[in-house]
Amino acid sequence: MRLFALSLGTVLLFGAAGFAAGCSGSAKKPDDLSTTKMGEGQMGPNLAGPRQGVYLRASFDDDPSHFIGRFIASSVEADDVDENRGIQTECSKFVTYKEVNASGTFDEYYNSSTTVRGGLGISNPASKAMPAGVNAPEGAAGLEHGSGTSIRVKYELQKKLVANVEDPAGFAACCDSSPDNCTGIYIGEFWYGHGTLYENTGAQTGASVGVSATQGQGNLEVADGWAWRKATEFKDVYFAFRVMDRIAADDCAWAQRPPKSADGQYFVGVSPPAPTEDIARTAAMRHARTQAVQYMGEFINSSTMNSSSVIQGYVESENVVTTAAEGMANFVKDDRYCAPEQIETPEGVKYKVTVLAFFPEEKKQEAAATTLDAIEKSAEKDGKLTPDLKKSLGELRKKIGIKK
């Protein structure tokens, strides 16, 4: 089935402006870590701060549905947030949930309460124990969020429980009827999958860690100038939750004017009418990833001063766009959804979904490699991978700094 087909010739000719790197400090209250603040902070793997609005759970299990719709009091410090601090009020009944499929492999920093860290047997980050005369690695300040609550998590996402407010007017009226009924944020998602938690063991140079690894300490890794040791593995459980902004929960103004972030780019993906909401969500994310491929075309051109005519004749293929967009699954992550639109058709009710997705700026090099790999793979499959094309692709990778 053809969904949002594009010519990669167009992809390589037209894209948006490049990204600008930036930093921002971490906030203290959980209200300031909600999803609507995402663009103002760091997110994604190998960045200074934890992914905003997402917290590691106090208990990993297979059914956290009873926590959906619970409110987090504004008095709760970021260091103390976990799902057990959520408060169920009479307005929580307006928040139901749906199970949706999800996918992608990620390496990120998550918030966690100090109680959660202790329960998992993970010590506080060793960022204060810097050796004399050694400067903190770039971005190290973000790793010491609050009293040191960010945890590195490498995981594969499989599905989510997502909050659904079917009666937004009733929800708003309930919250407005009493100041004690609702706070600014509530628990709106739980994430299911498998992966590994890593403990920060202090600042290390690449050389010193390399020596340690050769001595048999294979559980040691380096990220952002820090040494990380495998602490806990988890499999087939709901391991994280996300807080949602109550006021903006059903406000889809972002679909017309996406937020801006110095840390990357937002995309709005829209699905065609689909027989199920799950299929519509998948199609909307595919549309967002296709747009990310367009941005990669611009990045390749701007980074290499490349004339698209060098490879344009080989890349006007829908297969290239599809392959590259699938590769973007590891880089482009859903941020929030509009309520699904139901459409009456002769075949029955169909669903249309709009998603806001985020592409972190620091992943653009890897995403460019994915795009070039898709071009090469498609050309080879079609018998069009000539020596000149292969050489041109190699030169583009070299200019961008991609090793293959």
Image (tube, helix red, strand yellow):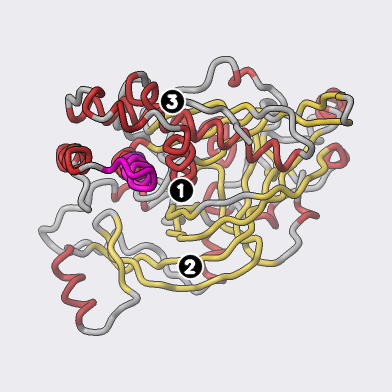
Disc 1, disc 2: CB below 8 Å?
Answer: no
Residue extending furthest toward the front: 383
Write down the residue under mark 2.
196
Residue at the location (18% across, 37% down)? 392
Disc nearest the viewer among 1 and 2 = 1
Q: Horizontally, is 295 left or right of 111 in the view?
A: left
Residue 378 lies within the magenta run: yes
Q: Quadrant of residue 301?
A: top left
Helix, strand or loop at label 3? It is loop
Marks 3 and 2 sit apart, C-alpha to C-alpha, by 39 Å
Answer with mark 1 or mark 3, whichever residue precedes in sequence. Answer: 3
Residues packed near mark 1 inside 10 Å, few (<14), some (14 to 19) or many (20 plus) = some
Q: Which residues fall within the magenta stretch?
A: 370-385
The x, y position of residue 216, in whole percent, is 26, 84
Write down the residue under mark 3.
7
Q: Horizontally, is 171 left or right of 225 in the view?
A: right
Residue at the location (64% across, 36% down)? 1
Q: Horizontally, is 101 left or right of 223 in the view?
A: right
Disc nearest the viewer among 1 and 3 = 3
Write down the residue under mark 1.
330
